[in-house]
Image: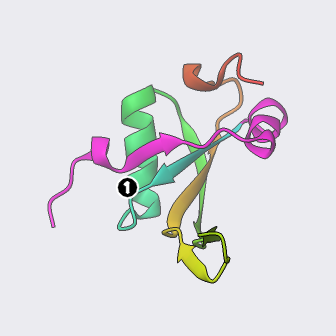
Amino acid sequence: MTTNLYEVLRRPIITEKSNFQNGKLNQVVFEVASYATKPMIKDAVELIFNVEVTRVNVSIAPGKKKMAGNSRRLVNRRKPYKKAVITLAPGETIDIFEGVY
């Protein structure tokens, strides 16, 4: 399977926890493609944002249940997604996450 490094990163995940990680721990969080491996994610972040990555942690977030209809008998399930927590080298930052609180 041929893949483009620009397709590996889907979107940044901006939550209260990820803002704390960005400010105190020098980490950023991205939703990534389901087929992405740690080396692929590291290469993509280093190429796209021109930063040095020291560590990549990957987890699969489960799909959550969502109630549908008035009777609450219909239950839809959201899709699970793969999440990557990327630790940057000291002094490195990514501009997307600057000023987001």
The residue lying toward the viewer, choosing from 74 and 44, is 74
Q: Quadrant of the N terminus?
A: bottom left
Where residue 43 appears, as percent x and y from the top left, is 39, 46
Q: Quadrant of the C terminus?
A: top right
Q: Is residue 9 left or right of residue 93?
A: left
In the displayed structure, 83 sits above or below 45; it is below
In the displayed structure, 51 sits above or below 95; it is below
View extreme (bottom): residue: 73
View extreme (front): residue: 70
- Region of the chain picked out in magenta, as a range: 1-26
Instruction: Please say whether residue 64 is visible from this viewpoint.
Output: no
Q: Secondary structure at mark 1?
A: helix
Where residue 79 appears, as percent x and y from the top left, is 48, 69
Residue sitting at x 65%, y 70%: 70
Residue 2 highlighted magenta (yes or no): yes
In the displayed structure, 99 sits above or below 16; it is above
Q: Which residue is mark 1?
A: 40
Where residue 31 appears, as percent x and y from the top left, is 51, 51
- Which of the 4 quarters of the picture holds residue 63? bottom right
In the displayed structure, 25 sits above or below 83; it is above
- Which of the 4 quarters of the picture holds residue 67? bottom right
Residue 73 highlighted magenta (yes or no): no
The residue lying toward the viewer, choosing from 74 and 60, is 74
Residue sitting at x 52%, y 70%: 80
Residue sitting at x 51%, y 29%: 51
